[in-house]
Image (spheres, rainbow, N blue to C red):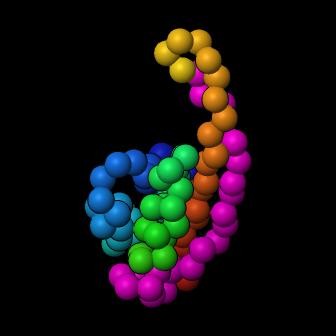
Amino acid sequence: MPEDNVIYIGTKPMMSYVMAVVTQINSGSDVVVIKARGRAIAKAVDTAEVTRSKFVPGAEVKDIKIGTEQISGDEGYKANVSSIEITLATKA
């Protein structure tokens, strides 16, 4: 999958990510992947649901992957962080 079809969720307002997903779909992408870690997971789910219900009613959730990633801190400690990947696809 091309990397430009991936939307990484961070600290921006949710509607910024919704518009990014809608822009990807309107530019011809059939599949868009929304990725998030940690506290941003809730925002990723909200982004997918708002996109589906309000802006792209023909889109459906094709796949959801959850997992744990290990990240290293500045002082050498390691922490486990939850992650999610939501795959949205337009009906073909």
Q: Residue at x 30, y 59 (%)?
A: 13
Residue 85 found in image quarter: bottom right
- Residue 26 lies, in percent from the top left, at 34, 72
- Quarter occupied by the C terminus: bottom right
Q: Residue at x 70, y 48 (%)?
A: 67
Q: Is residue 31 visible?
A: no
Q: Is residue 62 visible?
A: yes
Residue 70 found in image quarter: top right
Nearer to us in this view, 36 or 58: 36
- Residue 51 lies, in percent from the top left, at 41, 76
Farthest residue toward the top?
A: 75
Residue 24 found in image quarter: bottom left
Q: Residue at x 54, y 46 (%)?
A: 37
Residue stretch rendered in magenta on the structure: 52-72
- Residue 76 lies, in percent from the top left, at 59, 12
Q: Residue at x 64, y 29 (%)?
A: 79
Q: Is residue 64 found left or right of 11 in the rendered image?
A: right
Judge whether residue 43 is colored magenta: no
Q: Main secondary structure of the magenta part?
A: strand
**Location of residue 37 with respect to 92 vertically, above or below:** above
Nearer to us in this view, 64 or 23: 64
**Location of residue 2 with respect to 23 vertically, above or below:** above
Q: Is residue 70 found left or right of 60 in the rendered image?
A: right
Nearer to us in this view, 59 or 84: 84
Total number of numbered labels? 0
